Image (cartoon, rainbow, N blue to C red):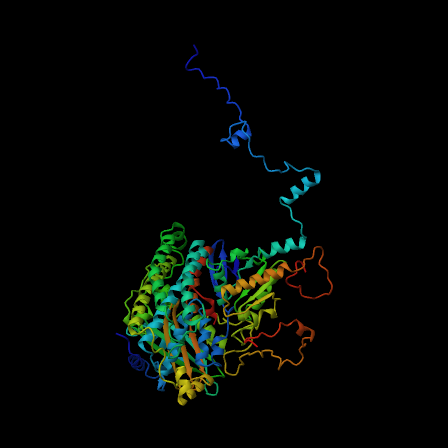
Amino acid sequence: MALAPERVEQMLRERFPDVAFERQQGEAVRDHTLFLPADALVDVCTFLRDEPECAFTMLSWMGGADYLPRVPRFECVYNLLSMTQRGRFTLKVRVPEEQPRVRTVTGVWPTANWHEREAYDFYGITFTGHPDLTRILLPEDWVGWPLRKDSPLGYEEVAFTHNTPGRIKPSPALKKLAPKKVRYRAQ
Amino acid sequence: MTLNMGPQHPSTHGVLRVALELDGENVVACKPVIGYLHTGMEKQAEYKTYTQSIPQTDRMDYLSPMSNNLAICLAAEKLLGVTVSERVQAIRVLLTELTRISAHCVWLGTHAIDIGALTVFWYCFREREKVLSIYDMVCGARMTASYFRVGGLAMDIPEGFLERCDKFVREMPAHVDEYESLLTKNPIWLARTKGVAPLSAADAIAWGVTGPSLRGSGVNWDLRKAEPYSGYETYDFDVPLGSHGDAYDRFQVRVAEIRQSTKIAAQAIGRIRELGEKGEYRLRDFKYVLPPKEEVKTSMEALIHHFKIVAHGFFPPVGEAYQAIEAPKGELGFYFVSDGSARPWRMKVRSPSFVNLQALPVMVQGKLVADVIAAIGSIDIVLGEIDR
Amino acid sequence: MSDPKAPKPPAPPAPLRTLAQVARPDVRSGAPKAPDLVMPTGPVSDEDRLREELEKGILFTTVESVVNWARANAIWPLGFGLACCAIEMMAIAGPRFDVSRFGAEVFRGSPRQADLMIVAGRVSIKMAPVLRQLYEQMPDPKWVIAMGACSSCGGVFNNYAILQGVDKIVPVDVYVPGCPPRPEGLIHGIMKLQEKILGSKIELGPIPRKKRGTQPRAGSGAG
């Protein structure tokens, strides 16, 4: 019997009556997602992991997202998985740009370690209390947060003849070495 | 002593760097350093349409390309809110299970060659070549297939494809017997993998390990059974489990999975034969799926749809979706955030090897250096997926 | 009476037969036989004797040809698989596309023992200094094959993370296009490299330092 996400939301609202939960609206939001304020994150996660009816013992993944023109700019998405109760649940935390700090959940699920490092690497969101918050995928001395919407893709212009003005043109003598045109039809 | 198992190493299965703190031969601390293959796929996906991101996924877990294709197509289809026809689901299941067999063959070959058993490498690659010929037949490319599309397949299966698959599926169990005869009771193999790199069930769950590594520790969790997709609930197969969580158990789980995959593939072949060897291979909703070429040449609406989809891409509704599949390595999931335009606002890949590798320090704590090699091999990592 | 237990004296040897009798047992000795072919029974002069000795197993060639022939037919690649192309590189080591026919099946683990670096896969910016260091650790003569689109020119990935072509940091001898190139394609690339090696010049003696600060040219022996 799968665990219904609505039941999880109901349990959360009962347990944490003074935390401002907000269900994400949208017809095409295919997973039941709950926004919550950053300071309640660790307590809610600990409750979800330890409560026997939910038993979200695995953090499936955690990622960041950048919604640039919107304020607050960043979001941290946590996807929880309960294997014994067979259910998934998604939590989201909105992170402002001026103070991109969120408390770490590595105390609740150790697997969050690398996920949070990746979010830090890509977006610059710092996770307070993280044991080793360093860049994970990019070189340690890289400057900038590549997945932010205002960071460029880093596209390198491919050199064609029309956009390489100073190139050395091949000498006419080279044309003599070129093979004769191939005839595809009897002429 | 600090020893660096550098990014260039014959046994690290790609460009993985493991910084080991050693006390003699025993590992005191182990820190995997990744990022040597970072490709910026998630950033690049924000500049490409959904269909253009499908070939990128081939290059993620490059040992099981069709699995990745399946995951991204299912995620996009979940976002759109569509499901494909049964026939397409059966073809997808067949190819995904063949992919699983080929990925496990490569795993076994490379794991064995790390430990020293060279013969298994040759045999496994011989089988893998057969699967690659099947890929070649169906989509033209050996490895980077990109055969699945959002809403179906790129093209229909060719003549003779089912016979070829059938032949392979009937011959495969004998080959698995061959591998088992070489390794399962081999004293050297047992000495190198039994009791090596143990991972308890609680640790595995805490560290987010999924896939055969999790099942090797005894946890019965397979997304094909627990959260079925693409018609898996209608197939009859078992999920092999280990008990001790050591490298030997993970080996046994994966070899048993090859057998189960042949079983599923055989059922899928039967299902495709029932539903028609030739038939509809794409949805008929031309808002997202390319119309058939015959209609494009005769009908104006189909032509306009074709142009729109090729030039701009399709426009999913504003929202988000996460769909996970049971890839050969574990839970592979794609999370799409759509803002209504043809390009995803965010694509996040939950790659199994990225999470499974985190458990490596837990597995080799206090063990010997040689066990680190066996551990890395038994977790079955692919750096393309870890670094994306 | 001789003692029956005493060792008997050896029997007298059988009379020797001539070669003619052994060779043609059907011919009774004395019968006329066909004449032998007229052949010299041996070298007739000193010069001929020397020529015969030489023709038995001595070649005349140049040191350059021999050295290049040896280098071309025993190229030892460095095991440097980065990404998907690495799997096709492993496939050429596999049973179907056997690269040991070309002498290249020993993929060395250490760059100090290898002379070919097949850059198989995309080179990320984090990996680029490592690649350069490995290239410098390889002893001369060394060659580089850029396998696949990503190492030739950046391939599918034109973004911040991938080096747009490995020839930005190491000199490349052969570019093998493909994504990934079929194993036959890579073997074709190795054969092209063999042609290149066979046609290259080697320098014996001190390396001529014509200009300071130039990159060593790949493909030439000690240059």
Residue A79, above or below B125: below
Asked which quadrant contains residue C213, the reply is: bottom right
The spot of residue B115 in percent (x, y) is 44, 55
Give the vertical position of C47 relative to B200 (above or below).
above
In the rendered view, would you say A104 is above or below B339?
above
* Up/down of A174 relative to A30, above or below: above
**Picture quarter with the C terminus of chain A:** bottom right
In front of the other: A52 or B51: B51
Q: Quadrant of the N terminus of chain A?
A: bottom left
Q: Which residue lies furthest to the bottom in this view?
A: B300
Q: Which of A47 and B376 is in front in this view?
A: B376
Q: How many labels does the image show?
A: 0
Question: Is residue C73 shown to the viewer in this render?
Answer: yes
Q: State whether residue B216 appears in this view.
A: no
Residue C70 lies in what quarter of the image?
bottom right
Query: Going by the picture, which residue comes out furthest to the right?
Result: C210
Question: Which residue sits at x=70%, y=55%?
Answer: C204
| Occupied quadrant, residue B194 | bottom left
Residue sitting at 39 percent across and 82 percent down? B292
For the view shown, which residue lies furthest in the top direction? C1
Left or right, A94 with reference to B275: right
Task: Please give left or right for residue C118 compared with residue C44 in the image.
Answer: left
Residue at position x 31%, y 62% in the image: B240
Image spot of residue B238 (x, y percent): 29, 64
Q: Residue A78: x and y, percent?
A: 39, 77
Q: In this view, does B41 lie to the left or right of C43?
A: left
Foreground of the two, B71 or A143: B71
Residue B325 in percent (x, y) is at 36, 72
